[in-house]
Image: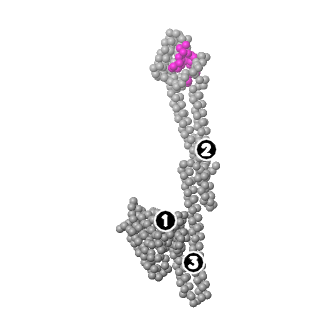
Amino acid sequence: MGRLFWKFFLCILLAQLTATIAIGGAFWLRDQARQKASSSLDSGPPAAVALDAAAATLRYGGEAALRGLLADLRRPQLYVLDAGRRDLLGRAAPAELLKEAERQLGNGEQRGARRLVGPDGAQYLAFVPRRYGRPERARGGPPDPLTPALDPGARRRIGQTVVIGAAVVASLLFAALLAWYFSRPIRALRSAFEAAAAGDLAPRFGRATKGGDELSDLGRDFDRMSGRLRALMDGQRRLLHDVSHELRSPLARMQAAVGLAHQQPDKFASTLERIERESNRMDKLIGELLTLSRLEALPDALRREPVDLAELADGIVADARFEAAQQEAGDGPTTSIAMRFLVEAESSVGVTGDPDLLWSALENVVRNAAKHGAGGGAVTVAVSAGDGLARIDVFDRGPGIPPADLGAVFQPFFRAGAARAGASTDGHGLGLAIAQRVVQAHGGAIVARNREGGGLRVTITLPQA
């Protein structure tokens, strides 16, 4: 048992003992009140009737008749003491009641006590106590089957002792059970933390603890957190491997170009052009990696400005048309054949977000459609709004993507060209990953679906301003 168990145990036990002491104290106060009440004299009508009857019996029947009356009288209890302060039935008269009776008679009061005079002139002291219990059986008289052998006060004290002892034992058991119940999931959670600190992020709390309380929910939350951390660490390892691979290729080509420049000085210009092209590729890759890292590390640290998606789509499509015209004119490597770009947009569709990042996200999607839809006709960008959402659909008529790979197109370094037959594989596979991170950082979603008749449809939804 750990320290937490003993803390729970002692706290619960203290609470239980406090409650037990409070209950015992209430019993004690009640007994004190009853004792105080039982030490006083009864001045009610039944007591007055009993005293009058005793006086008349003694006057006309003598002491023997009075003894018979006292033996037969059950309610109320009547004490009659002779001059030697001995009860006529041999009962032990409470000293407190005797003092109270003498005090009242000395003050001239006759509320619960009275002096009786016999035929022979002998004086007796009679009083009726106020009591809560059965009357005492007369010494030497017949046993009362309804009267217990023990004094009622003793029986009451024994019963209270038993109740308090049972309450203490129950408090011990209950405190131990509650302490074990509360500390068990915490011990399991501690072992899970120790395993996570050692590098083992496999979920284990859910198997160790079952239930629907807050501690079990905390353990399941920890399992989800550890699973998420494991997925992130695996993703980081994969990303590091992919980055190393992506950087190794242009570096190898640059080293080969430097070696070729040393061997063939006459081709220095073409070699320098090759080195410049590879350095630009590396610079672009590093820029995309930095953008992706910033989006993953600080998804909420974005500018929030009004952005018109229709205007944004017009600007991106205009750039794409210009690049396509330059490539068709022979100013660069041809990546499209008669590629056309169309925009279908409402007059204005506004959202709130970072204009530069939203431009980058949509530009990556459009460039991906232009690259993989080359030779398939037009790339269409449709902008619409409805139900509080802004929607951008990018259509192409390329070869599409196998259904098994649709969920992976937004992963870093996934080469869509490998999944789209006949498409160019130029690029680093970060464009759609960046687009997804941007859209998610703006509270939206992005999905890719194959179109009927061939091609791909990428849909972006964002909260409308």
Q: Position of residue 363 (x, y in %)?
A: 45, 71
Q: Position of residue 229 (x, y in %)?
A: 57, 61
Distance, label 3 to label 1, CA atoms, is: 33 Å
Say which quarter of the image contains residue 199. Answer: bottom right
Closer to the camera: disc 2 or disc 3?
3
Identify the residue position indicated by label 1 in the image.
450
* Crowd tier of the residue under label 1, counting other residues whose Cα lies within 10 Å: few below 14, some 14–19, many 20 or above: many
The reply to whether residue 46 is visible in this rendering is yes
* Crowd tier of the residue under label 3, counting other residues whose Cα lies within 10 Å: few below 14, some 14–19, many 20 or above: some
- Is residue 448 within the magenta segment? no
Residue located 43% across and 66% down the image: 393
Q: Is 269 rendered above or below residue 190?
A: below
Residue located 42% across and 66% down the image: 392
Q: Amino acid at mark 3?
A: Pro
Closer to the camera: disc 3 or disc 1?
1
Closer to the camera: disc 1 or disc 2?
1
Q: Position of residue 291 (x, y in %)?
A: 50, 71
**Labelled disc at residue 176:** 2
Q: Is 380 rendered above or below residue 51?
A: below
The reply, left or right, for residue 443 in relation to residue 346 is: right
- Is residue 87 within the magenta segment? yes
Helix, strand, or loop for circle 2?
helix
Distance, label 2 to label 3, CA atoms, is: 68 Å
Q: Position of residue 202 (x, y in %)?
A: 61, 58
Please provide the residue range marked out in magenta.
68-95
Comparing 414 with 354, the one in front is 414
Q: How many marks?
A: 3
Identify the residue position indicated by label 3 in the image.
250
Task: Please report contact status of discs 2 and 3: CB closer than 8 Å, yes or no.
Answer: no
Dominant secondary-structure state across the stretch colored magenta? loop
Ranked by sequence position, the earlier of labels 2 and 3 is 2
Residue located 41% across and 64% down the image: 390
